[in-house]
Amino acid sequence: MTLPGGWELIIIVAVIIVVLGGSKAASSIKNAGREIYKAKKELDDIKDIVKK
């Protein structure tokens, strides 16, 4: 599974802004970014454990 990139990401962000409005969209995007970062970090940790 890969994360959306390029145009897909731009379209997703645009839909969020239209649906939620400005201030809610900004906080939602910020939270989504945090969750993606956490998921990537946990995936890297799991890969490190499996390699050991």
Image: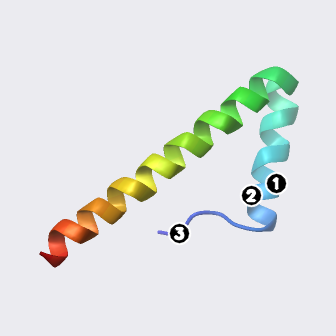
Q: Position of residue 35 (x, y in %)?
A: 50, 42
Which residue is denoted by mark 2 in the rendering?
9
Disc on res. 39: none
Q: Nearer the viewer, residue 49 or 8?
A: 49
* Amino acid type assigned to the residue bearing label 3 in the image: Thr
The reply to whether the C-beta atoms of the residues labelled 1 and 2 are less than 8 Å apart is: yes
Mark pair 3, 1: CA separation: 16 Å
Crowd rating for badge 2 (residues with CA inside 10 Å; few <14, some 14–19, many 20+): few
Mark sitting earlier along the chain (3/2): 3
Say if 27 sits above or below 47 in the image: above
Label 1 SS: helix
For image coordinates 87% across by 26% down, the residue present is 22
Q: Residues within 10 Å of mark 1 (few under 14, many from 20)?
A: few
Residue pictured at 67% horizontal, 31% vertical: 28
Left or right relative to 13: residue 43: left
- Residue 4 placement, left or right of 47: right
Among numbered discs 3 and 1, the one appearing first in the sequence: 3
Q: Secondary structure at mark 3?
A: loop
Image location (x, y in percent) of residue 17: 84, 35
Q: Which residue is mark 3?
A: 2
Circle 3/circle 2 CB separation < 8 Å: no
Figure label count: 3
Q: Which residue is mark 1?
A: 11
